[in-house]
Amino acid sequence: MYGLICSFALLWATPAHCFVLPLSRHDVQLPGETSPLSSNRFASVTSEDNDANTSPMRLPPGRRTPRFISFLFDDSLRLLNPKTMGSYQTRRTNQYGDIFKTNIFGKPTVFVTSEETLTLMGKEEGRTRSTKGTEAFFPPHHQSLFGPNSLLVQSGEAHDQLRRLIQPSLSLNLMTTVYEPIIDQAMDEFLNTLSTVEKTIDEDGHFELVPHLRSFFISIALQILLGKSSKVPPGLAEDLTTWSKGLLAAPLTFIPWSTAAKAMRARERIVATMTPLMEQARASKGDDSLLGRLVSTVDEETGKQLSDQEIMDNVLTLVFAGSDASAATSMWLTLSLHPQLKETLKKGPQEVERFVDLVLQAYPPAPFSMRLTKQQLTIRDYDIPAGWLVVYGFAGALASKHDKNTCWDTFASEASGEKDAVVSGSAAFGTGPRMCPGRYLAALELKTMCGKLVEKYDWKLREDQNLKQSYTPGFFPRDGLQIRFG
């Protein structure tokens, strides 16, 4: 029974980092137009694939489970198992190519696992978004946890309008003028406290770093949300942690003691806590907090402001996205395993930015994102029928590019250039008009932490620990990255 419950938990797990915002409605080839995703690769189609039994379709290669077999026998659990969700994508890519068909959730599915194609899809998304070819896909449980007005859940014009209201509060200009001083001070305080950690796992002072990183990134997200001088209400950080655990749980909300039910109750408490804070933010003029900006922003095209419900749903989305410690853990692990990189990174901010971008590509925090097609699409001359899922395999597209044994030596020996500094445009943040709105904030946090680590601090990895990473979601070492700091 425990194994079955775990299987359901895996089935309903989806990426929860801002680097995984679902891609929008795109990939529709209009009559008389040539798609930039065209290719001459074709695949034969079986009657099982051609559900409409009309003209033959040009489907990608791959295999599909017969429709009478449960999803437990299709590729759902291979994709969603934390131990295999990255390796599954690379195995299937090696077998069938970077576009292939399968079944997920019992539904016919097409995977895309090519960084180049993902980038082209972003361009195609901007060209064809008005045709409403796809929409965001999340299981109902996750839609309830994020809320119906979350940027993650919305598609089409509703998404575009929300984005116009939210994106200015996370602009690149605000990163340097408002949020960077908060992050810089908080980072110094956090790194200094690691030298005094009391709860260690051995007499040599080793401790698990990952729990400390998780707590820190939640706290810094709340500082940015509420303002540096504001006191975080008691229990809010704990409720956010409980809420986030529901994103990994089976949707057993009818069982009061289940993780899912606890997460929903935590969401109710978060809303009750945040409601008076939103009222205070509206009453306070000149508030530089993220919340203050959200309650006062106005859509220049429509004159619309965000409702309380829209703010609440997207506060949850942004705080959770901004509080994921996955990329920071991968960065810290890389520096631990390759201490020679420190000298290269001390050369300047451009080297740090280049390094952060490579970390995001070598260890994608978000393994995939899903869309549901509303009409037939054409991708590199492959047809995707209406009603199919499209999975954007970030783990397969990015991680498979990098040989972990050589890429860091290559990084240290290469000279940086303007073309290398592309952190905000990395495919790890998604592509196209739905690129993660918090990408500048995420990049700033990583660059700040990296710069301080290489300039001021030393640490050692504990021997004989399991450093193999798995998605939970986020990409973390099995033993929590055990270190002795200082």
Image (cartoon, rainbow, N blue to C red):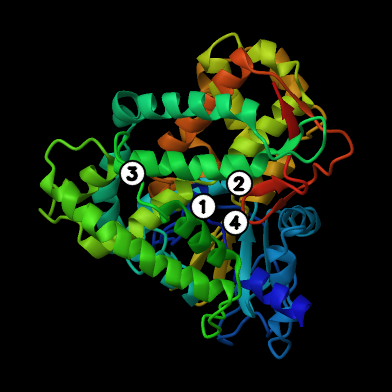
- Tag in front: 4 or 2: 2
Sequence-wise first label, 2 or 1:
1
Secondary structure at numbered mark 1: helix
Q: Are marks 2 and 1 in contact (CB under 8 Å)?
A: yes
Q: Position of residue 363 (x, y in %)?
A: 67, 41
* Residue type indicated by callout 1: Val
Is 454 placed left or right of 318 in the picture?
right
| Residue drawn at (42%, 49%) of the image | 319
Residue 151, which numbered label? none
Q: Position of residue 208 (x, y in %)?
A: 71, 41
The residue that disc 3 covers is 225
Q: Residues within 10 Å of mark 2 (few under 14, many from 20)?
A: many
Sequence-wise first label, 3 or 4:
3
Sequence-wise first label, 2 or 3:
3
Q: CA distance from mark 1 to mark 3?
A: 20 Å
Sequence-wise first label, 4 or 1:
1
Is 168 placed left or right of 363 in the picture?
left
Sequence-wise first label, 1 or 3:
1
Q: Are marks 4 and 1 in contact (CB under 8 Å)?
A: yes
Q: How many marks?
A: 4
* Residue type indicated by callout 3: Leu
State which quarter of the image contains the C terminus. top right
* Residue type indicated by callout 2: Pro
The residue that disc 4 covers is 368
